[in-house]
Amino acid sequence: MFVSAIEKIQQFTRPVHSISRTYGGLILPGTATIFFVNNEGVAITCKHVAAMIPSAEKINAAYQSFRLEKNRIASDGKQHKHLTGLEVKYSYTKEATIQLKNTFLNCFDKLEAITTHIHPTLELAILVFKGFNKILYNGHATFVNEQASIKQGQYLCRIGFPFPEFNNFRYNKDVDDIEWTNTGNPNSPSFPIDGIITRFLGDAGGISGIEMSTPGLKGQSGGPLFDTSGHIYGMQFATNHLHLGFDLRDKEIMNNGTKTKVSNYPFLHVGLCVHVERIKAFLRENGIQFTEAPIN
């Protein structure tokens, strides 16, 4: 049902690949999603996705400062004490993130800067990419117009990049840095998930979001919500967990021929999307060109 729409949406929906390194030495891959709203290098995504851009600069700068101070510690009997004090100063525990790098995959031939516009209340951000010569995405979003009927029970789809499979990165011991490589798998598959509109979200400005009957998966944040024609109804930003109340405590079941007691506290996971009219209003406020579907 969504085959042609997904093929259309994939042309201008792109993954954000991230790699982070903990002080304990783990390198963790992560993904998020953006989609382009015009042919001028402007995309939208979630506020928390856009926040990774300045966060990476801050985290990496802090680690650079840490390394400079660490290199000044004398190799004597007080070395361990001084290093421990430095770790406390920078709040570096084993799980702390000390490096973060992001890349916007298959968007442009090159990139010099990104300007962000952050919505004051919604999980919404505009990314304006600068310094490219050629765009590598095709087409752009077409938003449903203000006359479109958006009602409870409508069947829609979302798409994003929730399952990172890329492995084109490494830790370079010689320079104590994580880096992207030209080897390995640079891609992650897109993943669609369908559902129906269950409820609407509201704030002081009116309807602000759309609740879907299925979850938005981690990595789909910033991905479009669309119909079978590929028209955009919103943008995935979070998943809410509704306690169903069908709790089981010490329920006796048979498992592989053995009686076992289990407990279960089930939740319904519902996806939350920014409403299309709030997206368009924010684009207008920032003078961003976009396209709407013709009024029927």
Image (cartoon, grey):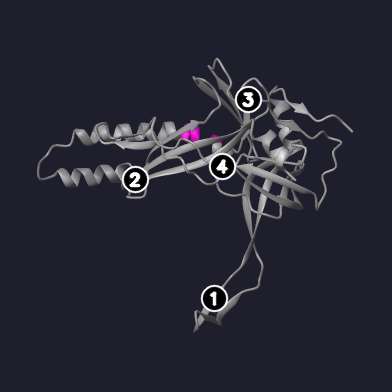
Q: CA distance from mark 3 to mark 4?
A: 19 Å
Residue occupying the point 54% across, 28% down: 106
Vertical order, 86 against 249 (above or below): above
Q: Quadrant of residue 71?
A: top left
Q: Is residue 53 magenta?
A: yes
Instruction: Nearest to the eye among marks 2 and 1: give it.
Output: 1
Helix, strand or loop: magenta stretch? helix
Provide residue 37's location: percent of width, then percent of height. Answer: 68, 28
Q: Which mark is residue 42?
A: 3
Which amino acid does the dot numbered 2 rest on?
A: Ser
Disc 2, SS: loop
185 sits to left or right of 91: right
Identified by mark 4, the residue type is Phe
Confirm whether the magenta stretch covers residue 33. Answer: no
Secondary structure at numbered mark 3: strand
Q: Nearer the viewer, mark 2 or mark 3?
A: 3
Q: Return the residue at label 4.
A: 161
Q: Secondary structure at mark 1?
A: strand
Q: Are marks 4 and 1 in contact (CB under 8 Å)?
A: no
Q: Residues within 10 Å of mark 4 (few under 14, many from 20)?
A: many
Gap between marks 1 and 3 measured at Cα: 48 Å
Can you tell which mark lies on residue 91? 2
Residue under label 1, please give it: 263
